[in-house]
Image (cartoon, rainbow, N blue to C red):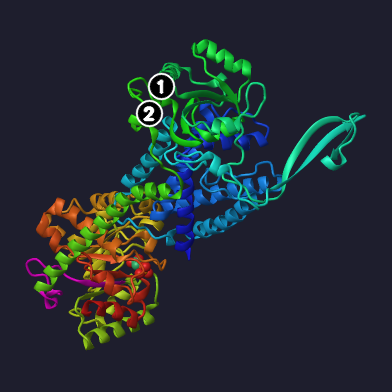
Amino acid sequence: MVEACCLLTAFVFIFSGFTKAVDPQGGAIKIGEYLNTFGLSISDDGVLLQLLSVLESTFEFVLGVHLLLGLRRKIASVLSFVMMLFMTVLTLYIYVTGKISDCGCFGEALHLSNRDTFLKNILLLAFTTVTLFFPDRIVSVLNKGPHRGVQLYSLLFVLLVSLWSYHYLPLVDYRPYYIGQDIPGAMSIPAGAQAPQYKTTFILEKNGERKEFTLDNYPDSTWKFIDSRTEEVSPGYKPEIYDFAVFSDKDEEVTHDILHQKNYFFWLIFPRVETTDNGEIDAIGDIYDYCRRYNYGICGLTSSSHQAAEAWEHSAGIRFPFYYADETMLKTMIRSNPGVMLVKNGKILNKWGKNALPDEDSLTSALGKLSLTYGNVSHGMTSTIKWLLLFFIPLIFRIFAGRISVSLRNRRKKRANNIIGKQDLIKNNNTMRKKIVAGNWKMNMNLQDGVALAKEINEVCKADKPACGVIICTPFIHLASVAAILDQNVVALGAENCADKEKGAYTGEVSAEMVKSTGAQYVILGHSERRQYYNETPEILKNKVALALKNNLKVIFCCGETLEEREAGKQNEVVKAELEGSVFNLSAEEWKNIVLAYEPIWAIGTGKTATADQAEEMLAYIRSIVADKYGKQAAEDTTILYGGSCKPSNAPELFSKPDIDGGLIGGASLKAADFKGIIDAWKK
Ligand code: PGA
């Protein structure tokens, strides 16, 4: 359930991030519209809104990738919840006020009504609420450490898409003016189709009184016009292009004329000539000369005034007819100022943004002989899927390559284990290390219950010989009594702690020597609960380890990272620091008495086990750093246990991993049957 919510949110974020990234100018226009509803008027041609647009799409896309792959789960789920909360409030606002008719959630790729957008956001808000509460149930697809690489890859991908689209033209054109579009065809309404019905309301004023009228009851001229608004009352058939209208400088409609030119026709589009990038005048001059040479049509289209267009022509020293159209329509046609479209008979043959205008080097002969007459068609959903696949393929490849290499390594190691045979599991000869299941009772059991439990474990293990070493580590008060009843050839005894001082005035402490004198052979040191609740530092633990070894106790030394550290990808460095701080100072001889236990803190007593692959990965890493320190053979001989919510149900899978030599068991060691169930995992 959590995973389903997470995946759905992830796909929506990736899709909507991408559709906005391909059209940063479109995003800027939309942000400008939103700000306008709050009375803030900022030009969408300016850097600020363009930058905001790129940041927004990048954030959404990268967040989607994090959710999809289960990277930085906690922070990703908090951020998606906050984002959806914000979006839901915003879309509720536009739904209620009707100030914006299209939310722009999916750029120009998909248009939703305000109601549908609001409902979609409510749903996503519910999904992100679920992931907010259970971030650690999000499946982490990448076990190994390529998180940074993947984060960087998705960031670079989406930024490159944005920058390319900003510099040239949108990588995927979702607007109806894409290359290959037949504009008159897209404007036509099929015979018999119903046209949309609109209602216009006029706000007029007379003697300080304001009233609303419609065309039906429009009053006499004593009322002064203040404002008007037009609403669609019945949708009707809306053609793909419904707003294309072009006028001459005398306000005569010339739409039909410019759409039905039989010859090639260059439309130079300047949404506003006042803000046109004049760095491109030379290239425009080249197009102009070319059209004159080959007798092709050329015209300017702008929303600016006739005077402004003339002023531009004057400063550019070029003259061609200018026509006038709505600014939004021109910006929809091409995301560039200036931009150029090559059209024939109303069909768009090519489009160029200001940074890639054709110049005299490419305009070398008649258009029929040039490849300019058909630009690359990249529009709609098929192109979107193509680009997203292009993004995902290397990712999928990386995930599978990682998995295959882990499973090959596991298989190789398993084969090596099988050759040696399970009868050798218990005792370490030359290369095989000891397999161990150790119980850690923690602060549980009074003396009588503890002795009874130890007796039961002793009996079941004697009756059915374990295929591994078994140890029970008990509170100090049990040690002597339990030692008296255990057959330590079958079940060995250990303590859960010892003092960091040899002896003396340390009230309440129990020294390593005292532990040893009870008959115990092992001691657990460095358990995360002692590090956390009793402030045991690496230095204190180093002293404890030294004293335990001095008193001929074997040490089960624990290490492991917190959830935050794992989510930050720091588990390796944390574990390495713990080992370096307390046990890597030992001599090679001393090292032989160390058993390591990797216990991710987030898995201890929580019911959340690390997956077998996660545990194997860490244990393999720990073995590799032991090899760096003490050599390959010593690493091969070191017993490394996994601890943290290990149960009879998951022990077989965990123990099947080549680097996992058994478990350190907390909760499940308090019941003889459960503990035996885990011990028996070595027989499977
Ligand atoms: P757990 O404890 O099995 O109850 O998670 C393991 C441990 O702390 O050693």
Residue under pointer 1 = 294
Q: Note whether residue 70 is visible.
A: no
Note whether residue 670 is visible.
Answer: yes
Q: Which residue is mark 2?
A: 367
Pick out the residue farthest to the bottom. 463
Mark 2 residue element: helix
Residue situated furthest front in the rendering:
262
Nearest to N terminus: mark 2 or mark 1: 1
Please count the marks in the image.
Answer: 2
* Tag 2 near tag 1, CB within 8 Å: yes
**Where is ligand 1, by quadrant?**
bottom left
Query: Is 326 placed left or right of 150 in the picture?
Result: right
Residue pictured at 38% horizontal, 46% vertical: 387
**Residue 52 within the magenta-colored segment of the rendering:** no
The segment highlighted magenta reads 421-439
Residue 457: x %, y % from top left: 29, 82
Residue in the picture at 87% in, 41% down: 217
